[in-house]
Image (cartoon, grey):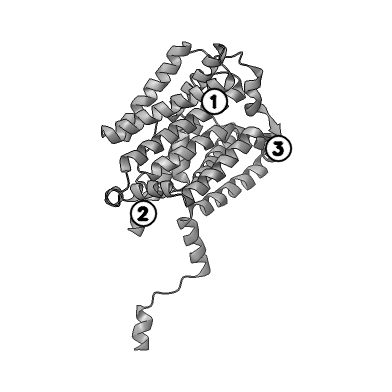
Amino acid sequence: MSIAMESLTPPRKSLVQRVLRAFVDIRELTLLALIVLIIVVMANLNPYFLSFSNFRALSVGMAPTAIIVIGMAILLASGGFDLSVGSVMALSSTVVAMMMLAGYSIPVSVLCAILVGAVVGAGNGVLVTGLGINPLIATLGTMSVARGVALVLTEGFSLSSLPKEFGWIGKATWGVMPVLVILMLVMIVIFDLAVRHTRFFRQVYFIGANEKAAMLSGIHVNKVRIIAYVLTGILAALAGVLLASRLMSGTPTAGNGIELQVLAAAVIGGASLRGGEGTILGAFLGVVFVALINNSMTMLAVSIYWQMIVIGGVLVAAVALDMLIRGRRG
């Protein structure tokens, strides 16, 4: 009898197996290990990599992407995604610059730019939920429209000579830490806690995991998804305003290709294209990972064109790994 019971009892996994399993299941641990590995390798290849000026430039440069990825991670959790974030970023950057140059105050200009992002986000939400258009087609269309509007408004030129006060948040420091980076970290913490502990975001994940069950439980699926798209649009617009503040110009070509980096970072961080999974912390670590790859290749004098190939390859590999892990679990 005892022999039979022993044969039915699954063999205990070794400590190494349990640790490896934790790294596979908890994406944040894997990313932290990879980030540390990149830092160690690059520190040996290029001593300048560990300099304060490099990490400052790296953190400031990735701040807009990190802010946008918050919305993308939430949207992916709901079962959707948004390819228009880069264009919304450019449009809001253009709008805030145009309004200030027209004589409007900084608060009014910033508010209007963020409102533009909310309107585009609401439009995406209505197209996807109301008309039933596939998110790929809907947001691809709004991506083209938003970018086109930004280019038409500026005739393709950047708008400079902005008020000096506007550049404070983009260039100011608190001690040795840029205010832009502090704002990014505060937003990451707030949204990570909100996603983990608030009812609305629990509904977002429930919808992404099982839309029919969410509807049967009384959740207003369309309303929640539209709010998620609006939130993503607002965060993309905020990133555009902050970029304009840092560069002291509104740029209609800003954010070109950033949607790929944001999507790659979110998926690398544990979000799934099928919905229902992912964390804000994981998405942020994905942004750090992608930024470190770009920074490392730049320091190694790798062509920008090869960098695009590498990021695209990383995205495909992350999606393939996600599908493989889900297949084994299922």
Quadrant in which residue 1 is drawn:
bottom left
Pinpoint residue 328: horizontal percent, then vertical percent. Answer: 35, 58
Badge 2 amino acid: Arg
Q: Which residue is mark 3?
A: 52
**Front residue of this view, candidates 161 and 56:** 161
User: Depth-wise, is mark 1 or mark 2 nearer the camera?
Assistant: 1
Return the residue nearer the eye: 33 or 56.
Answer: 56
User: Which SS class for mark 2?
Assistant: helix
Q: Position of residue 139 (x, y in %)?
A: 35, 30
Q: CA distance from mark 3 to mark 2?
A: 40 Å
Three-letter residue code for mark 3: Phe
Q: Note whether residue 240 is visible.
A: yes
The residue that label 2 is drawn on is: 326
Q: Which residue is mark 1?
A: 241
The answer to whether the residues at label 3 and label 2 have Cβ atoms under 8 Å apart is: no
Tag 2 or tag 3, which sits nearer the N-term? 3
Residue at 32 percent across and 34 percent down: it is 135
Determine whether the residue tagged by mark 3 lies in a helix, strand or loop: helix
Given the image, on which type of amino acid does mark 1 rest?
Answer: Val
